Image (cartoon, helix red, strand yellow):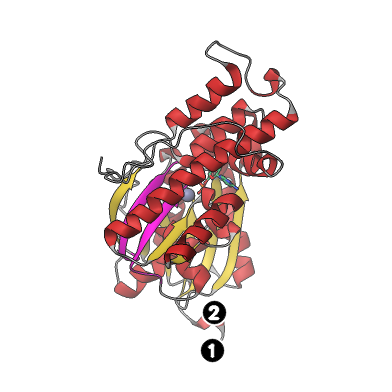
């Protein structure tokens, strides 16, 4: 049967700073896929500026949808539903995707499906592996989140723990800023860390060793980096600090190793506590090469099954919105009153 005769849905993703769309069949076949990154717009501010992000989504959403449909060879009228990530994320950004989805649904009388962005990050493992990955422990490590979940099914997540302050990706971005490496910090730190000595700086591994807690804490680690680099005064930061290349590499490697140790330690603890044998990881930080190596070797050693998607499915994209197929099959549709929900679920402390 030609792909376009199968039921297919348009998925939209505008939770943060990527404008993305995909067309996916009910057999999880990706017919078209576009991601328009805004990295260049936020670079000079050292982080995502919410107002700039939402304006850029407004400019990009229609061309991104057009291009995706063209790749897929389907028209709006041939779609069977439209799905949109309506939580969590930046309010202004979420609204752009939601309004675009509602407008298409209204104009073409199509059902609307809500996507939880965090569930979608874990679902990227389902798509990448081509097989069922539930139940599992889910770890989401991105710019805004560092959470552990018990994932019974693609749509049934119970929070086990998470960060009590900064997200892992946020810490990568801030430390990169201190080192004058620019935004986004994760890929830059990972690159320079390859030439660095991870043992040169003794940095803390917050909450590691406290086996009663499934929490992360990266704020103190970030401060420890700052003190190690500049002392306690008010130093010139970033490029103005004129740090030498070896020191930048060594600090990047030492910091990265500390974050990786925390993530690996608490992921294993979550597996032990739940009794689950499978770990699924999503979010931008899951693209980190050192983390991928370390978690692979730790889970291999302990006999757990590990799923981490390929790099382009780790960072924000609309293909992971294929989770909407699960709701489509269950007939779980939303009314056009659907709203955004910017906030996060409460993490047990
Ligand atoms: O999932 P994502 O694209 O967007 C959010 O939902 O936040 O994650 C973006 C985050 C940024 O903080 C970025 O620095 C981090 O993921 N990141 C990385 C790497 N690539 C992206 N962190 C560490 N190593 C990487 N290679
Ligand atoms: Zn994300």
At mark 2, the secondary structure is helix
Gap in angstroms between the C-alphas marked 1 and 2: 8 Å
Q: Main secondary structure of the magenta part?
A: strand
At mark 1, the secondary structure is loop
Please determine whether, in this image, residue 145 is positioned above or below residue 235.
below
Residue corresponding to mark 1: 1
Quadrant the N terminus occupies: bottom right
Task: Please identify the residue farthest to the right as the structure is shown.
Answer: 245
Q: Between residues 179 and 184, which one lies in front from this camera angle?
A: 179
Q: Residues within 10 Å of mark 2 (few under 14, many from 20)?
A: some
Give me the disc on residue 4: 2
Q: Which residues are magenta?
A: 133-154
The residue positioned 62% from the left and 19% from the top of the image is 237
The residue positioned 46% from the left and 33% from the top of the image is 204
Quadrant the C terminus occupies: top left
Q: Is residue 87 visible?
A: no
Please determine whether, in this image, residue 220 is positioned above or below residue 116.
above
The residue positioned 36% from the left and 42% from the top of the image is 209
Picture quadrant where residue 185 is located = top right
The residue positioned 28% from the left and 60% from the top of the image is 274
């Amino acid at each position: 049967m030609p792909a376009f005769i199968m039921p297919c849905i348009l998925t939209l993703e505008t939770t943060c700073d990527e404008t993305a769309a995909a067309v996916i069949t009910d057999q999880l076949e990706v017919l078209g896929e576009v991601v328009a990154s805004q990295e260049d717009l936020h670079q000079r501010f050292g982080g995502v500026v919410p107002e700039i992000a939402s304006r850029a989504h407004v400019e990009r959403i229609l061309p991104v949808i057009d291009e995706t449909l063209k790749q897929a060879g389907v028209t709006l009228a041939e779609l069977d539903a439209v799905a949109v990530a309506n939580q969590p994320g930046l309010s202004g950004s979420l609204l752009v995707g939601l309004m675009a989805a509602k407008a298409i649904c209204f104009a073409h009388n199509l059902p609307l499906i809500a996507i939880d962005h965090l569930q979608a990050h874990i679902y990227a493992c389902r798509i990448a592996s081509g097989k069922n990955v539930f139940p599992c422990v889910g770890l989401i490590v991105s710019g805004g989140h560092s959470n552990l979940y018990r994932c019974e099914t693609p749509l049934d997540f119970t929070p086990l723990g998470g960060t009590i302050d900064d997200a892992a990706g946020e810490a990568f971005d801030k430390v990169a800023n201190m080192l004058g490496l620019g935004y986004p910090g994760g890929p830059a730190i990972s690159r320079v860390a390859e030439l660095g000595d991870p043992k040169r700086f003794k940095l803390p591994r917050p909450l590691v060793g406290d086996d009663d807690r499934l929490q992360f804490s990266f704020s103190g680690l970030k401060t420890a980096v700052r003190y190690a680099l500049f002392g306690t005064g008010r130093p010139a930061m970033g490029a103005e600090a004129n740090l030498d290349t070896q020191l930048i590499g060594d600090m990047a490697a030492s910091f990265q190793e500390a974050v990786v140790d925390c993530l690996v330690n608490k992921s294993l603890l979550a597996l032990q506590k739940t009794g689950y044998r499978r770990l699924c990881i999503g979010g931008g930080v899951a693209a980190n090469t050192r983390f991928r190596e370390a978690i692979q070797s730790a889970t291999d050693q302990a006999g757990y099954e590990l799923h981490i998607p390929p790099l382009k499915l780790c960072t924000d994209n609309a293909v992971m919105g294929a989770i909407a197929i699960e709701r489509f099959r269950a007939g779980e549709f939303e009314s056009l009153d659907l709203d955004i929900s910017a906030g996060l679920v409460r993490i047990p402390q």
